[in-house]
Amino acid sequence: MWLIAVAVPLLPTIILLSSRYRVKVATLCRQAVAWALKLVRGKVCVRRTHAFVFSQCTHGKVDSILETFDLYAKTHPSLCIGPEIGEALDEVVRRVSPSRVLELGMHCGYTSVRLLRLLPPAGRLITVELDPLTAELGEEIILVAGFKHSQFQVLTSSSAEAISTLHLNIEPNSQTSEGFSLVLMDHDPQQYLPDLLALEREELLCPSGCSVLLINRSQRAEGLRETLDHIRARADFYFVKTELQFMVEVFYQREITV
C-alpha cells in the first residue's frame, strides 16, 4: 500500500516524461530491432554462402573458390564484395606488392583468398572479424583454398581491440619490420577513421608508404565521408590516390623518399 501512496503523486511526472521521450524511445527500439535483424540476416547469409562455396568448389583450387563465390553472388544477396571490387583490389595488390597485409572485416573469406593468392611465399595476411561464426567459416574457406596457417592469422575481435594488440601478433621479419604496406577496411565505416588513427598511433602503417583501401557501400557512406574529410585535411601524410564508386585508395607516407 505504501508503494501506491508514494507512486500516485509521481504519476503526472511519469506521464509527462513518457510523453516527452516516447519518440526517442520508439526510435531506439526501432534501431535495436534493425540491428538484431541485420545480425541474424548476416549470419544466415554467411552460412548459406559458405555452404554453397564449400560444396560446389574444387577444394585446393584458389580459382575455383573465387569462381564459386562469384557464381553464388550472381543469384543471391551476399556479403562477399564480388568480382568488380575484387579485380580493382587485385590491381592494387599487384602494384603495391605487399609482404604483410591487414584486413579489417573478413565476411565470407572472399577477399582473404583474393589477397593471399597474390602475396609472395613469405607474405602474411592478418584478418580481423568481430563475429565468431563468420571468422570460423571464413577461416575454413581459406584452408579449403589450400593456404596454410603459416600464411595467415584470423583474429576474432573488434577492430579496435585487434589494433591495440597487433604488435603481439606480428612476427619479426627483416623484410616487413616497418608495419603494413596494405590495409583493407571493409567493416563498419563508422570505425574507418578511428581505426586509421589507431593504426597511425600504433605505428603499424609502413612509414615509407602504405595503401589503405576503403570499401564504399552506398547504404553506409557517412563514415567514409568523414574519413575522407580527415584525410584531405592531412595533406602532409595522406592523399587520395584512387577514388572509384565502390572503393577508395588512400596513400599514407610519413617518410619522404628522395
Image (cartoon, rainbow, N blue to C red):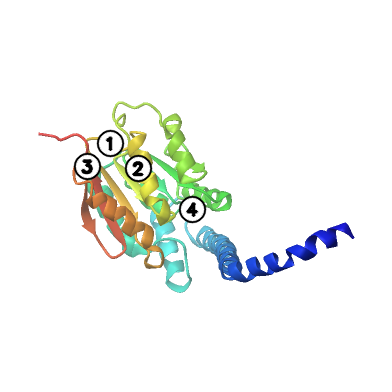
Q: Judge whether residue 84 can be spotted in this image.
A: yes
Left or right: where does residue 120 sit relative to residue 152?
left
Tag 2 residue: 197
Tag 4 residue: 59
Mark 3 nearby-residue class (10 Å; few <14, some 14–19, many ≥20): some
Residue ranking furthest to the front: 9
Say which of marks 4 and 2 sits in front. Answer: 2
Q: Compare marks 4 and 1 and give the one earlier in the sequence.
A: 4
Residue at x 32% of width, y 53% of height: 227
Say which of marks 2 and 1 sits in front. Answer: 2
Name the amino acid, label 2. Answer: Leu
Percent across and percent down for residue 229 are 27, 55
Name the amino acid, label 3. Answer: Phe
Q: Compare marks 4 and 2 and give the one earlier in the sequence.
A: 4
Marks 4 and 1, how far apart at CA: 35 Å
Viewer-nearest residue: 140 or 174:
174
Q: Compare marks 2 and 1 and give the one earlier in the sequence.
A: 2
Mark 2 nearby-residue class (10 Å; few <14, some 14–19, many ≥20): few
Percent across and percent down for residue 32 are 59, 63
Name the amino acid, label 4. Answer: His
How many marks overall? 4
| Label number found at residue 206 | 1
Q: Secondary structure at mark 2?
A: helix
| Mark 2 vs 1: CB contact within 8 A | no
Q: Is residue 57 above or below residue 254?
A: below
Percent across and percent down for residue 90 are 29, 54
Name the amino acid, label 1. Answer: Cys
Residue 205 picture quarter: top left
Residue ranking furthest to the right: 1
Marks 4 and 2, how far apart at CA: 39 Å
Mark 1 nearby-residue class (10 Å; few <14, some 14–19, many ≥20): many
